Amino acid sequence: MKSLGAVLFALALVTGAGVLAEEGKYSSQPSQPQQQPIDPRPVKQTEKGVDPSAVTGDAADKDESTEPAEVGAGDFSAVLDFSILDTLAIQDNGRNKPLQTFITEKMELIVGRKLFKGVPVLAEKISKQNISGTDLFLSLWLKPKSMIRVPLILVSYGPLKEELGLNKAEKHFSFERLRNLPKLQEIGNGAHKKRLVKQDKDLTSLEKEAEIVLKRMTVAWSIINGAENLKIVPHPNQQSGDWVSLSELQESFGDLKQSAYNETKANALYAKFNAFAIAYRERDPS
């Protein structure tokens, strides 16, 4: 098996775009589950509320009532070198930007930003590890079934935590815990209705803060579903053309379709993704 560093370099040569894949989407081998410390705190199971980002797909397949809402993030002790990501790019809302810039922006929004340094690092409260924004980003994409239960979404407003029944002394909560809080969805729906009728000035502080948390959840879900959402494959012949996601690239070779992309090169890209996903999940740093 190729190491992570070698695969990242090969991916940079093949695409000049991104280097990620959704768990199992393009991998020929299943990932090996990691032993994760279980959160010892009691988790009250409530009736699932409407998910703010229309959660569907693999990460939501399990019956959440049989699983803890929060677990540790697994073992991040193996140090990985992500410097090659500085050479890669992504298209975000029609703008091309370095992949590392995109990662930093999104992870700062989800977990918060360290003052002055400007580098998002999560002090994960269960496994007691400091995890970089890049590692968190890749784990959300490559290991979503476990990462939706890792406490990484910032909830900073004390009155909102009190309203939702969350521990006011804690700052980060898992996607799974938050999406099982009907009260959060209820507050968010109230804010949305006010915005629809141009009553933004009537929004309460509680509603504004709930919107921020729901936005963080939506961003996290977009990364979990990166194969569908992240535009990491450049246009085949137009420098200013629209990029596509991995799923869109794959779908372009479907029945009765004439893809603008070279299928041989696309298959080579998928092979590189297979190797990258395996190397990352096994945390091969060499």
Image: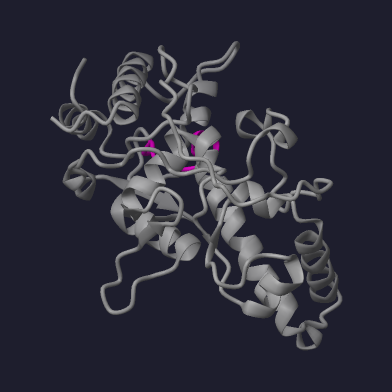
Closer-to-camera residue (86/169): 169
Q: Is residue 65 magenta?
A: no
Residue at figure coordinates x 41%, y 12% from the top left: 28
| Residue 183, placed above or below residue 195 | above
The answer to whether residue 102 is left or right of residue 155 is left
Q: Which percent across, then down, holds residue 145?
A: 55, 33
What range is drawn magenta here? 226-235
Q: Which percent across, then down, holds residue 134?
A: 32, 50
Judged by its main secondary structure, the magenta piece is: loop
The answer to whether residue 264 is left or right of residue 39 is left
Taking the image as drawn, is residue 243 in sight? no
Residue reaching furthest to the bottom: 201
Quadrant in which the C terminus appears: top left
Closer-to-camera residue (20/187): 187
Q: Is residue 228 magenta?
A: yes
Residue at figure coordinates x 57%, y 46% from the top left: 70
Quadrant in which the N terminus appears: top left
| Residue 9, placed above or below residue 91 | above
